[in-house]
Amino acid sequence: MKIDHQLLEKYWSGQCTLVEKQAVEAWMADDIPEDEFALRKSKYTPEEKKDILWQNIRHHAEMTDAAPKQKSIWKSWPKVGAAACLLCILSWATIYIRSDKMAKKPIETTRFVHIEVPFGKKQKLTLSDGTAISLNSGTKLRYPEHFAAAKREVVLDGEAFFEVSKDPKRPFIVQTKNTSTRVLGTRFNLLSRSGEADILTVEEGRVQFTAMDCIDTLLLKANMQSTYQAGKMKLITVNSELFNAWTKGELIFDNKTIKQVIPELERWYNVKIRCENTAILNDQVKGKFKQASLASVLHDIGFATSIKYTIKDKEVSLYR
C-alpha cells in the first residue's frame, strides 16, 4: 500500500481502516522513511491533531494493558511508537512554523548617540522628547535616539545645562561616574569631570541627587547647589545664574584660584597653560568676561594679580 499525504492525514485524524492503520504504523516502524512529506493544510488545527494523537496513544496503551499476559507488549510497541513519533513531528512542525513567524518580526534594538565636544567649542542639541541640552567644552554625552517607555536616561562626562521637557510618567535621569540626577521636568546645570567633585546647581523646579556610595539622597530646589566628593554631599544656597553663565558665552571667576582657573581656560580656548612659578597658583581671581578673547582675559587677570603671560600658538606661559 502506498503511503501518501491523504493516507497520513487520515491516520492523524483517526479515520484509517485497520489495514490502512497497520500499513502506516509498519511504514513508520521501518526506520526513517526515505520519502519527504511537506506539511499540507488540514481541516484540523495543530492542537486538534495533537489531541487526536494523544487519544490514539492512550487507546493503544489501554489495549495493551487489557491484552492477555502471554502477549508481549513489544508487539504493540510499533503502534504506540508510531503515534508518538507522529506527535513529535507535528509538535516540531508547529514550533518551526511559530519560530518562522517570530523570525520575520523585526527585532527592536536601542541605538545610542555619542557626542564629544572638543576644547574651544560648545554644542547645543535637542533630544527626541524635546529636552534641550547645552554642552560645555570637553564634554561627552551618550543618549538613545529614542527613549524607552518607562524612563529617559543619558550619561554625562563633563558639564552640561539641561532644560528637561516635562513628562510626569517618565523621569529624566542623568548618570555620571559617581552620581545620579533624577527629574521630571526642570532646568539645572551638572558638572562631572574625572578627578573633580560632581556639582549640581538647580535653576528651576525640583531635582533628586544621589550617589552610589553615599546614603544621602538630596532634593534640591531653585538656587540650591549640591557638591559630591569622596562619599560626602554638601548642600548650599547659591545664585544659579553664576553657574550657567557659560551657556551665554560668559566666564565668571568668583574668587577662584589660578589653579582652578587654568583648566577652565584650557577647555574654553583650547590651549595649554604652563605655570613657571608654582607660587602664583594660589592667587585668587574675581571677574566677569563675556565673549572675551584669551589675551583680554589674561590681561585683566595679570592686572589684578601682577601675573605676566606670553602666548605662542596654542601655548600659554604664566610667570611673575
Image (spheres, rainbow, N blue to C red):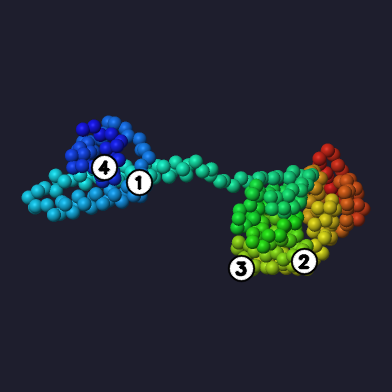
- In the picture, the disc for residue 215 is 3
Whole-percent x, y for residue 281 in the image: 80, 54
Mark 3 or 1: in front is: 1
**Circles 3 and 2: CB atoms closer than 8 Å:** no
Label 1 SS: loop
Type of amino acid at the residue the image marks with label 4: Tyr
Mark 3 or 4: in front is: 4
Q: Which of 24 and 230 is in front in this view?
A: 24
Q: How far apart are marks 2 and 1 (CA)?
A: 68 Å
> Of label 2 and label 4, which has the lower sequence position?
4
**Circles 3 and 4: CB atoms closer than 8 Å:** no
> Of label 3 and label 2, which has the lower sequence position?
3
> Of label 2 and label 1, which has the lower sequence position?
1
Quadrant where the N terminus lies?
top left
- In the picture, the disc for residue 222 is 2
Whole-percent x, y for residue 85 in the image: 27, 43
Q: Distance between the residues labelled 3 and 2?
A: 23 Å
Label 3 SS: loop
Q: Is residue 206 above or below residue 156?
A: below
